[in-house]
Amino acid sequence: MTHVCITGNETDPGALRQRVDEVIRSHARVLCELRLDYLDLSPAHAFSFLAKLPSDWAPRLVITQRLRASGLAAQGRCGWDVPTWQSWWKDVMALRPWFAVDLDWLVVDRITGESLSWQGTFRGRHAFFSLHGTLDEAENLGPELAASARKHNAGIKIAAPVRGPRCLARLMDLSDRLGEFPLKTFAAMGDAGRAWRWSPLAGDFSYFAFDESRTTAPGQHTFQDVKPYLTGRQRPDLYLLWSDDAGNRHGEKIWNSVFLARDAHARYVNVACTDVPESASDHESWARDALRWMERAGVRGASVTKPFKEVFPPLLGGFGSVNTLWRGEGGWKCASTDGEAVLRILGEGTRGSVAVLGGGGAAQAVMRALQAAGHSVTQYRRDAEGFLSRGNNESVVVSTWPGPYQERLVEELARWGSDSIKLCIDAQFSRRESESPLALWCRDHGVEYVPGTEWWRWQALGQDHLWFGENRPGARALARLWKLVPHSKSETIRALAIAAVRKGRTEIRHPSLCRDAEVFRAAIESLGVDVEDRDGAWWVAPAPLRAPQDPIPCDEGATGFRVLAALAPLLEGGVLRLDAAESLRRRSGSAEWPMKIPAAFPERVSVGLSSQFATGAAIAAAGWAGRHGGARSFVLDGVLRSAPYFSLTCSMLTAAGACVTKSGDRVEVSVGAGWKEGWITEIRPDPSSLAFLEVAARGMGGRLMPKEPDAAGDSEFPLLLDEWLQSGGEVDLGHHPDLAPPFLAAAAVLRRPLLVKGAPQLRHKESDRVELLVAMARALGMETEALADGFRVSGAPCRAARIRTGGDHRIAMAAGVIGLSHAGVEVDDRACISKSFPLFWDALTLLREMFP
C-alpha cells in the first residue's frame, strides 16, 4: 500500500508517545498520526510534547490538533482559542519537517474569516485542509474546501459516514469532481465504509487504528490487520461481503487467513449496509451504485447475503438469488453456490425426499440444485401460523431459517415428528452448536446434524473456484507446501542401490529423508559403500561390496529388503543376513530370522506379488555385467504387478549407463560401453505421498499434482482419479496398489462410490490393506465389502470415528485426509507416517489453511 497512517485516541501523553514509538519501529513505510486534540494539554504543553520527540521521527508523523476537539475532558480550561490555535500552528510547522499537518479547514477559513499563512514557515512535505461532516455537508462545502486548498497549494481530507453503496458512490463522485491535489485522502466512515479504506479511492493514505481499543472512527481496521500488506506498494485486491450485519465476521476471519496462507495480496471485508432497498423499484439503482463502486475500488469478487441476494441478478443476466459476484470476461458475473454446497454435503448417489425450510434466496437456490440432481423436494415457508403444511416424511431437512427463529423451528419439528428425519443441514451459525436449539433437538432425537459453518465452508469453496479458478492456491504458496513433501523413497532406494553396484561417483540430489530411505542408506553403508552428505545431496563412492558380520536391520522397508536380498550374489566375505520388523517378517513367510540370503543369481524371478523382486534382480544383473562384461538375464515369473515401478528401475539403470532390454518375460541387462562417469540423478517429489494431498485439494475444489505423468508410476494418480470420477466409481489398481488408500480417502471426501479391483497384492503390504481399508470404511458409516483383489464402498455417509491404522503409514494418511472434510475422524497412531512422509501432518495443516 502507498501510505498507512496509524492513529489512536490516547488521552495520556505517555501512552501516545509509546504508541508512536512502536509504530515508527514497526515498518519503514508506516506513518503515525498524533491526535493531540485528545489530550487535555495547554498550547505550551502540547508544543513541548512535540519538541521532545526524536527529530528523526518527524518525517513520518501527521500532526492533528483540531480546535473544536481540544481539551474536551478539561471542558475548555486548557487555554485554546482561535488566535492561540493559529499562533501555535505556525510555531509547530516551523519546528520540524513533519510528513503532514492536518489543518481544520472550517476553523481556518470559515470561523476566523481568514486563511492561515503557512507556506513560508512550514518545513514539512504536506499540509492539508480537512473537513469532517455528513455527506451532504461534504458535497455542499467540498468545492470551497478545494478552492481554498488550491489557493494555498495544500492537500485535502474529507471524512464522512456512509450507509451503503449509494453513499459510497456519492463520495466517489465527489472525489472525482474535486480533482487532484498534492495530497488527497477521503475516508468513508462506518461499517459500510470498511472496504473503502483498502481501496485506491482512499487516496494517498488510509487511517488504521493502533488496536481495537483506540479506534477513532466506526468500523476502523487495525494496525494488525494492515501489517501483512505493507510488503507491497500496491493496495490489495478486494473481496467483499455485502450484508446488513456488522457482526458477521466469520467470512472475514477465514478468508483473510486463507489469503495470508496463500501469500495472496488480497483482503476480504464485510460491507455492512444500513441503506437496504425498501422496495423492488429501489433494487436496480442500489445494485448499479454497488457495481459501479466495486469497479472503481478494484474489487475482484464479492459474497452476497441477505437481504441482497436477489438485487444483482436482474442487472447481470441472472435469475433468482445469488451469493457470489466475480469479474469475468465482459464484466461482472453472478451465481449461487448455496445449492452446490448442500449437494456436496449429501454426496453423490444419495437420493431421497428433502424438506427445504424457508423462502429466501438461499432456499430458492437449494431447491433448484436439489431438483436438478433428481431429489424429491418440498419447500416449507413460515407464516404467522407456522409452516403452511405438515411434513411428508422427508428424510433430509435443510433449514435456511436464521438463528433467532430456531426456538420456533424446533416447535414446528416437534409437531412434524422426527421418525423419518435422518439428516438436518443448518444454514445458521450465529449461535454456537452447543447453544443451537436445532442442534440440540437433533442430538436428542438421534438425527445427524450438519452445522452452518460446514455449509458455509462448502459454499465458500464454490466461491473460491469462481474467484480464482483451478490455479489456486498460487505458485508462491505451493512452493512452501512442496518443501514439506518428501522426495520419492522408491527412486532414492533405487538410486542408492545402482550407485552401490556401479563404478564411479554418484550424486543423488534431493534424496528422500523418510525412515525407509534412511534405513536403506545405513544398510548400503554397512556393505562398505561410502555415502557422504554434501549440500543436501548424497555423494556415493562405490567400493567392493562385503557382507557384514552382523545382520542388516531393514525395519519395515519391503523395497529395501528385497533389493538388498537381490544384491547377495555380488557380496564378498560371507553370507548376507537380513533382519526386519515383525510386520515385514510376517509378510516374508520365513520362519527363520535373521534370514540368510543365498548368493546365487536366480534364473526366474517371481513377480506375482511385487515388481520389487524384478527391480532387485535387474540392479544386481547390472552390477554383475559391469564387473564381468557381457550380459545377465532372468525370466519374469507370473503377472508383473506394479509394472510402472519396474519401468522406473530400467530408466534409472539406463541413465546410469546400463542397457536393459525386455523381450516377453525375459529381461537382459548389460553395461556395454561402461557406466556413465559422474552420474547425477535428481529425485522427484514422491507421487504416492502427493496423492493424499491431491485428494485433500480436490475435496476443496483445487488441484496439486501435474496432470501429465512422468516416469514415476504413481504420478498417474490425477489421470486415474479423473477417470474414476467420470466412469462411475471403478478403478483397476493392479499397477498402483499404493494408491488404494488415497482412493478410499477420495471416496469419503468426494462422497462417491468406489470399486477397487485388480490388486491382490494389497493384502501383502505393511498390513492387510484390504481389511484395514474396509474396517475404516465401516467405521465411517460407509457400506463396504472386501474382495479378493480389492474392495467396494458406498459413497456416504461419513461420521466421526477413531481409525485403527495397524501401524500402516498409508492408512493413517488416508484417515488424516478424510478428517479435513469430516470432523471427528482421528487415527490411533499419528507417528507411523514417518516411514514415508515425516511432515505429512504439517503439510496437511498448511494445505487446509490455503482453502476456506
Image: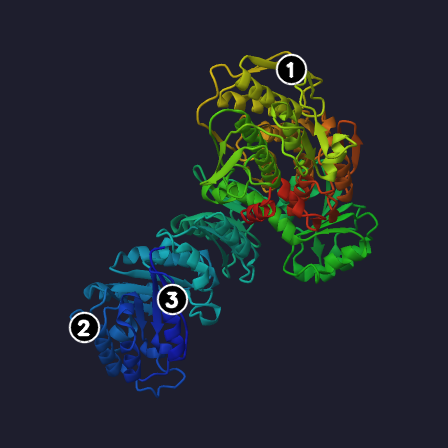
Type of amino acid at the residue the image marks with label 2? Ser
Type of amino acid at the residue the image marks with label 1? Phe
Give how far across and how far down residue 474 sits, in percent: 47, 42
Q: Where is 457 relative to 632, above or below?
A: below
Crowd tier of the residue under label 1, counting other residues whose Cα lies within 10 Å: few below 14, some 14–19, many 20 or above: many
Give how far across and how far down residue 838 sits, in percent: 60, 44
Crowd tier of the residue under label 3, counting other residues whose Cα lies within 10 Å: few below 14, some 14–19, many 20 or above: many
Circle 1 sits in a helix, a strand or a loop, which is it? strand
Write down the residue under mark 3. 23
Q: Where is 594 relative to 103, above or below?
A: above
Write down the residue under mark 1. 634
* Image quadrant assignment for residue 170: bottom left
Asked if residue 385 shows in the view, the reply is no
The tag earlier along the polypeptide, 3 or 1, is 3
Task: Give the left or right position of residue 658, taking residue 792 as reference.
Answer: left
Q: Residue at x 49, y 50 (%)?
A: 259
